[in-house]
Image (tube, rainbow, N blue to C red):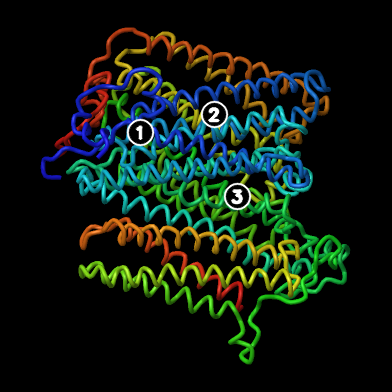
């Protein structure tokens, strides 16, 4: 700091509105979920209202931040704070996925074999008494209770072998998402060279690829439910498969939405300078993160 | 451009806004710190009232006051409120007040997000407490909410509990990101990492732990939600999952969480002992390395909470030794505090009394933790009152004493007034006696085999339970004296000097008392 004063923003009413929106959102979500069996319940409107409030608050909050930035109020120090903040946020997201990957590794490496009586663990003996017919395999197609409580799937999403590789959606998803990581990088390079056209074009392609990915993922879920009989309640394989790919898909939608906003800001408002474009950079970091998670999914959920 | 932006540059000079909007819309780290501290005080009293219900029921064997179902709700909410509503927000409040002043920053790095992370909390706890009035009652499965008790057998309010934990977690993550970014990016020139006050160091490490493990908690409650309502089988062995998986995920969060509640205490106590010993702190850099080692080790010890669930032998042995290893850096810290006091010019004002009591009583809690780490011994102690005694020793005369010490130590800087030293000492001695009378006998009844979380017990445990309840009432009602002292100090009293304490070191003592609304609008010079 060269003698300048620090940046301290004024009072703001956005945070408390955001807290209130979150409150409405989670109250709505909880009551809706608790009343899923009750068709007369109106709680879903609280949920919608909470969502609407959240989006509006975020819109005006981000608009304010962008305005302040364009007015030149952001010191270099504040800009650096945004950089650190985004990095730590992504780290927290990594840990969220780590919980689900941890669950996957645990059931694959330990819980399922134990349930089938492998190893010397005491619990395994109990399992043999409870479910003697269960055999350990991955994907678990027949649950230990032989589908008593669960809808058993006919087919899994696992690697179908080289002969059918080209009809295998996850392979196409991988190609699409990896290419989109590359195109967002090309967009970034274009911006750093001051080539706005290149930036807009490649960012547009990235958003388009994001849409394709989400579409393919939706198709895959449709296939799973309609043709494979693979559902959330198909036992542990369905649980881990849908939760991991589902949260990833949700993050793809968020990341794609962020990139779409950046594209709109660039095309319609001419935002982002050659050396000053952290809003875009943050969204692109998020995009690369989503891509890395997919690679992990592709290896550990689909292939192995 | 909006008016907000045009008026921006003269903000630094004027004081707080008038009326309620000061607190609702504030971006000031001192206001937000105050909000956090008062919120945690309110939660401390609510959670404390629940503890009084628990101890009243346990005063005698047999069922006297509450139904067993309600008792279960009390132990669950007592734990959740004290941890997520009492201790954690108190430390975040202290971080808000102190970190910017200690490193010469004007405010937290992301002030609006700072406001958001506070204001989520009242809503989250409103949801949690309102579950008491829902059909089927509040969550009743203990604060560790083990599956399947919290999934298959849970009351309907568990859904509200899950979502309130989600937004509490979001609040903690945002608060922690703010602290990390402030410390990494906002230090005045000259405040290098190894010159940072230890409270700042302790919070840098705590915030890292928070960002790493709160998302894991979010994952755990999400899996619960899916298992309860959407047919997944993460924690259901019939579908190929495992209830023990819940415990692994929970304690992967839960063990670092324990250190989240004690590392800032280490920082606070280091400052107070240094000041009232009128000496330089012994072994500053070893203190930093000890905290870092504790933080790293905290990620590889989680299964010591689960020795009796049927882990493979190799896992039991690994987690036993890893846990015992933590005694080494913790021992380093205790010896450093003692060495700081050794041949110092000691005086025992209220903050120092609480700090010294912290060192002694926290060490007792640490040593009973070492006993629990021994696998064959833990098979005996698991889920008895010995465990209850252990973690209350590290949390009440540990974390909470450090928070009280911090309040007495810094309140002259916050309010500009000195607290009443005689009342402060009275509060200390009542608390000190109360806490030991409450929790020390629980070691005995635990070793004798009394299980935790039951509203009734065998006659042989009656005497020590009665002693424990008497201590709990003494401790509980003495906290009303604390409330009185704090209010009295805020309202008026002897004016504090800027330096406040003769031996105090650090940037926060260079500014006026009370600290001006905006400190350090330009970076201070630090050698």
The residue beneath circle 1 is A12
Q: Quadrant of the C terminus of chain A?
A: bottom right
- Pair 2/3: label in front: 3
Q: Is residue A35 left or right of residue B319?
A: right
Name the residue at 40% across, 20% down: B20
- Pair 2/1: label in front: 1
- Residue A58: give x, y in percent of width and height: 43, 45
The residue beneath circle 2 is B396
**Circle 3: is it few (<14), some (14-19), or many (20+) Cα within 10 Å?**
many
Give residue A100's quadrant in the image: bottom right
The residue beneath circle 3 is B251
Observer able to see residue B265: no
Q: Earlier in the sequence, mark 2 or mark 3?
A: 3
User: Does B339 sit above or below residue A236?
Assistant: above
- Pair 3/1: label in front: 1
**Are discs 2 and 1 less than 8 Å apart at CB?**
no
């Amino acid at each position: 700091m060269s003698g300048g004063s620090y940046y301290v923003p004024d009072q703001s009413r956005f945070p408390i509105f955001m807290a209130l929106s979150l409150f409405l959102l989670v109250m709505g979500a909880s009551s809706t979920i608790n009343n899923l069996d009750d068709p007369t319940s109106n709680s879903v409107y609280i949920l919608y209202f909470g969502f609407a409030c959240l989006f509006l608050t975020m819109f005006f909050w981000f608009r304010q931040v962008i305005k302040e930035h364009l007015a030149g109020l952001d010191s270099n120090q504040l800009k650096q704070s945004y950089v650190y903040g985004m990095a730590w946020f992504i780290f927290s997201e990594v840990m969220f996925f780590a919980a689900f990957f941890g669950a996957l590794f645990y059931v694959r490496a330990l819980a399922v074999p134990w349930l089938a009586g492998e190893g010397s663990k005491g619990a395994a003996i109990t399992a043999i008494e409870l479910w003697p017919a269960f055999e350990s395999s991955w994907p678990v197609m027949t649950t230990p209770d032989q589908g008593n409580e669960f809808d058993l799937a006919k087919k899994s999403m696992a690697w179908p072998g080289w002969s059918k590789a080209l009809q295998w959606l996850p392979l196409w998803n991988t190609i699409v998402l990896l290419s989109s990581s590359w195109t967002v990088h090309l967009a970034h390079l274009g911006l750093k060279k001051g080539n706005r056209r290149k930036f807009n074009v490649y960012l547009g392609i990235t958003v388009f690829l994001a849409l394709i990915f989400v579409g393919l993922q939706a198709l895959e879920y449709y296939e799973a439910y309609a043709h494979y009989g693979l559902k959330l309640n198909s036992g542990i394989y369905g649980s881990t498969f849908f939760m991991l790919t589902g949260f990833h898909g949700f993050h793809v939608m968020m990341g794609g939405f962020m990139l779409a906003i950046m594209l709109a800001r660039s095309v319609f408002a001419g935002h982002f300078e050659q050396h000053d474009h952290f809003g875009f950079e943050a969204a692109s970091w998020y995009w690369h993160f989503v891509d890395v998670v997919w690679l992990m999914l592709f290896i550990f959920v689909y292939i192995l | 451009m909006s008016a907000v932006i045009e008026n921006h540059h003269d903000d630094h000079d004027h004081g707080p806004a008038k009326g309620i909007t000061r607190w609702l819309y504030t971006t000031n780290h001192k206001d937000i710190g105050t909000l956090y501290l008062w919120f945690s005080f309110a939660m401390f009293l609510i959670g404390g009232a629940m503890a009084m219900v628990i101890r009243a029921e346990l005063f005698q064997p047999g069922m006297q006051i509450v139904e067993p179902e309600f008792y279960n709700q009390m132990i669950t909410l007592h734990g959740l409120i004290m941890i997520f509503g009492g201790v954690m927000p108190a430390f975040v409040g202290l971080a808000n007040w102190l970190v910017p002043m200690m490193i010469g920053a004007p405010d937290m790095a992301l002030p609006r997000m700072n406001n958001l992370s506070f204001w989520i909390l009242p809503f989250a706890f409103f949801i949690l407490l309102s579950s008491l009035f829902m059909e089927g009652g509040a969550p009743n499965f203990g604060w560790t909410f083990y599956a399947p008790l919290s999934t298959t057998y849970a009351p309907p309010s568990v859904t509200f509990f899950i979502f309130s934990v989600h937004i509490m977690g979001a609040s903690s993550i945002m608060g922690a990101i703010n602290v990390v970014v402030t410390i990494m990016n906002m230090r005045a020139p000259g405040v290098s990492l190894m010159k940072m006050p230890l409270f700042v160091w302790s919070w840098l490490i705590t915030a890292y732990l928070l960002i790493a493990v709160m998302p894991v908690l979010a994952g755990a409650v999400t899996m619960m939600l899916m298992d309860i309502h959407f047919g997944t089988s993460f924690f259901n062995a019939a579908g190929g999952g495992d209830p023990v998986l819940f415990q692994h995920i929970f304690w992967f969060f839960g063990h670092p969480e324990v250190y989240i509640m004690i590392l800032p205490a280490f920082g606070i106590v280091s400052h107070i002992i240094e000041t009232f010993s009128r000496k330089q702190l012994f072994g500053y850099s070893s203190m930093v390395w000890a905290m870092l080692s504790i933080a790293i080790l905290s990620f590889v010890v989680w299964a010591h909470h689960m020795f009796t669930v049927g882990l493979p032998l190799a896992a039991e042995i690994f987690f036993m030794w890893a846990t015992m290893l933590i005694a080494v850096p913790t021992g380093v810290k205790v010896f450093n505090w003692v060495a700081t006091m050794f041949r110092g010019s000691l005086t025992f004002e209220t903050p120092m009394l609480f700090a010294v009591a912290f060192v002694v009583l926290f060490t007792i809690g640490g040593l009973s933790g070492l006993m629990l780490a021994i696998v064959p011994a833990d098979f005996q102690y698991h889920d008895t009152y010995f465990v209850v005694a252990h973690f209350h020793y590290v949390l009440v005369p540990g974390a909470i004493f450090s928070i009280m010490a911090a309040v007495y130590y810094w309140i002259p800087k916050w309010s500009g007034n000195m607290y009443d030293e005689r009342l402060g000492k009275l509060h200390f001695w009542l608390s000190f006696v109360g806490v030991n009378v409450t929790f020390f006998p629980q070691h005995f009844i635990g070793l004798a085999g009394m299980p935790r979380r039951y509203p009734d017990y065998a006659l042989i445990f009656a005497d020590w339970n009665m002693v424990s309840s008497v201590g709990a009432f003494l401790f509980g009602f003495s906290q009303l004296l604390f409330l009185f002292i704090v209010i009295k100090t805020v309202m008026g009293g002897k004016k504090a000097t800027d330096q406040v304490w003769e031996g105090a070191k650090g940037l926060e003592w260079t500014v006026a008392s009370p600290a001006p609304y905006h400190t350090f609008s330009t970076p201070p010079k630090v050698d």
